[in-house]
Image: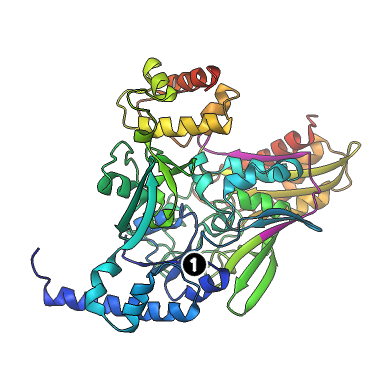
Amino acid sequence: MADYSDNQSHEEDLEHSTRRSFFKQSTAFGAIALTPAALVRAAEHQWDEKIADVFEKMPLNIEVNGVKHSLKVEPRTTLLDLLREQLDLTGTKKGCDRGQCGACTVHVNGVRINSCLSLAVSNEGKKITTIEGLAVGDNLHPMQDAFIRHDGFQCGYCTSGQIMSAVALVKEGRTHSREQISEFMSGNICRCGAYSNIVKAIEDVKNSGL
Amino acid sequence: MNPFTYVRATETSGAIRALGRDSHFLAGGTNLIDLMKMGIVTPEKLVDITHLPLKHISRTPTGLSIGALCTNSEVADHPLVLKHYPLLSMAFNAGASPQLRNMATVGGNMMQRTRCPYFFDTALPCNKRVPGSGCGALQGYNRMHAIFGASDQCIAVNPSDMSIALTALEATVHIQGARGGRILPFADFHRLPGDTPEKDNVLEPGELITSLTLPLPAFPDHVHYLKIRDRTSYAFALVSVAAALQLDGGNVRAVRLVMGGVAHKPWRLEAAEDFLRGKPATVENFRQAAYLAMQGAKAYAYNQFKLTLAPNAIVQALKTASGVTA
């Protein structure tokens, strides 16, 4: 990497000094749990240079598809970007990136959410399941199998989100009618319009008692 | 998204102390993270409050207490809410998508910003986003906008479905600040735009919503939340109506009517309630109540249709809630 320009270093120092004063305050409050003790100590001793790179990222312990990770993430990183860019789990798709399309749907502690609107750091200690975590070896999850059999997709971009949502839907017991399935799948948009086959796939899984 | 410092709070007083200038509490994030990606909100610090112990739903001698960090779906699906406050469940399930309801909290729902397209586009004027810059909607595309209580500074509407039901149920808001707590009627939490449309509500800087309380159940049946929108599901309201009735034989013993999608805050229809109370529950009386509710309504270039849609929605909500069709 090239050296930082003077200007850049100056800006970074300013930024760190703001953060340093905050960390000092936070030790006085005694209520803030984010900061490893070493960082607080470093801040009190004004060891700016040594801890500069640590300040840029936050520690994050997270379990994804049964694998535990101890990571460092920039606070702005969304759970979606963490999965795709840092953990190479690109099955979860980025559609609108604004919580409107559902392509990024994953399960957090068993509950379906939009990973594009969740900061990675706010998932400390959580268990994440992505589309990659559904199959067991070569055996597809029944919902994956049903989507294939019923042609529940065309281009496939929304499919991993649809399947993650559908798996949660069955678990929630919101499959009493086609209307209820449609209503509770409304957070997943399919621009190809495969909706009727998606509903059939979900009914199939529900009827087989899985 | 602008860079920010992330702080995780473990107790309420610490969270309040950690909040500084240009900082925000982070709960579900469904609105805040979106606004940050758009550059509409650019905090220097986020205080993550999701670890605070504000997640209870419990009976109290005077009703039900709901922690501010309960998610929308936790409240909507809770047996006590389904049985005693079904109007609230209906309103929750009319809002957003299942994924968003699993993330969004009750306190965050109260804090969500307007969906006015001029507020969401940083290239356009908006007094709510940049005070003094003007209102783009006033002379612009104002199809989704207010017909009640607007000002020449702002004609945006509050997008929350939950808040419409909580106003109808006469909920109470519990707020904690650095100098102590206070309790507000839910109806006094949101405000009209006036000359300060940048303020959606009466929360002071550094204050945190900690819980809501609902009074003892008064409307366990004869309720309906009617939401009219551009598609069947997952869209903001053009007009919505929360209707709750107590029927005594064929007469209206008690009634609450609140409209959404029409004002900067949940819009309670007191004149309509006063008219209906004690009268026979008939469609003719529902129509007269709707007529009274619409007095003072003012439409703009593209939302004239709401002047017809809103009274029809009031009548329909009352018909569905009461079961009266003639």
Front-most of residues B181 and B165: B181
Q: Quadrant of the N terminus of chain B?
A: bottom left
The residue to which callout 1 is attached is: B9
Residue type, label 1: Ala
Residue B237, image x, y percentages: 55, 44
Q: Is residue B191 visible?
A: no
Total numbered labels = 1
Q: Which residues are magenta?
A: B212-233
Host chain of mark 1: B
Furthest residue to the top? Answer: A149
Front-most of residues B146 and B304: B146
Front-most of residues B265 and B24: B24
Q: Taking B157 as reference, is B84 left or right?
A: right
Residue B185, image x, y percentages: 71, 63
The residue lying at 79 percent from left, 36 percent from top is B322
Residue B215 on the magenta segment: yes
Q: Is residue A83 visible?
A: yes
The residue lying at 39 percent from left, 41 percent from top is A66
Where B144 sits versus B192, above or below?
A: above
Residue A128 on the magenta segment: no
Where A60 sits versus A141, above or below?
A: below
Q: Secondary structure at mark 1?
A: loop
Where B190 sits versus B144, above or below?
A: below
Residue A46: image quadrant is bottom left
Residue A105, image x, y percentages: 41, 39
The residue lying at 44 percent from left, 77 percent from top is A26
Residue B225: image quadrant is top right
